[in-house]
Amino acid sequence: MSSSAGHIVGAAIVSHHPGLMQCEEFRRLMGHGEDSDLIPGYARLRERLVAARPDVVLIFDSHWFTTGYHLVDGGAKYSGSYISDEMPWYLHGVPYDYQGHPGLALQIEAVSRERGGYNRAICHPELGRHYATINLIKQLKLEVLGTPVVSASSCQNCEWPHFVTSGEMIGEAIRRSGLRVVLLASGALSHKFNGIDWKPNHPRIFHESNVSRPENIESDKRAIERFEQGRHDEILSNWDEDYRHKPWEAFGAHYLQMVGAMGGAKCRAKGEVLSAYENARGTGNIHMWFDTSAG
């Protein structure tokens, strides 16, 4: 480990929805002649990520559900061909080949054990991948950049404050590591699907009016406004009354762990909107970059 303190040099909430992995022709068909704005949003995010010069990208994976522990993958390398068991008719045959970072994963476990927490590293090289990780690796070209990636799971048998605590331990591990780390919270905001026989409110499938419920749109937009203001304290103080009931993807684990690593309620990192707020099968999606120099 480096003798200098590690830093979170950037952070983002990022949509990973699988429709973005379909071909451009089909996306434009679904978009009433225009592509999803989340696609150029990836390019905007990639520019900021490259400028941040991270040693590691840590992805909070809202599809990797675990029980009993908040896991972080500690393998040195992951390679294979990904197929989604959720949507295998089009998300299949996706090759991946990228480096992990065992040192950071083991540091996260060490801090957690020291503090009596539930973060653990799992170093099995054949551990399955999830598209909340794979889609971001492909869309952000992390393999091309050669940036190591560590994924963190969403533990499904804990309460939301446990996610914040998990993030706090990850933040401390990063400080001890001497590494420059970018955090990516991979997932949606409100995450209620439209029914299988649902009819669109707007011919552009990505249009925000196609998000599942008006109250979810309103809640998501309140969150986006608070992100822009850097008022993560207000997000957390309103979690039980508002966001927990929508609910966010993976109980909000991706965001809650990320903000925990950045200081929790004390975090004042302001969000920069990098895409339109869009629908994906009823869920609310956006890319936002957080300036951690203020966080």
Image: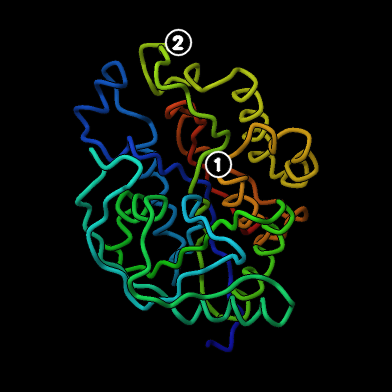
**Towards the viewer: 18 or 69:** 69
Image side of residue 242 versus residue 138, left or right: right
Q: Which residue bears the numbered disc 2? A: 201
Image side of residue 210 versus residue 251, left or right: left
Residue 249: mark: 1
Image side of residue 61 versus residue 148, left or right: right
Q: How many marks?
A: 2
Quarter of the image that includes the C terminus: bottom right
Judging from the image, the colouring scheme is rainbow
Query: Residue 239's image quarter?
Result: top right
Residue positioned 77% across, 41% down in the render: 234
Residue 168 position, x and y percent, is 69, 65
Residue 37 position, x and y percent, is 38, 31
Given the image, on which type of amino acid does mark 1 rest? Glu
Q: Is residue 136 above or below residue 3?
A: above
Residue positioned 37% across, 20% down in the render: 205
Mark 1–mark 2 distance (CA, rounded to whole Å): 22 Å
Q: Is the residue marked by circle 2 packed among few (<14), some (14-19), or many (20+) residues within 10 Å?
A: few
Give the SS element for disc 2.
loop
Given the image, on which type of amino acid does mark 2 rest? Asn
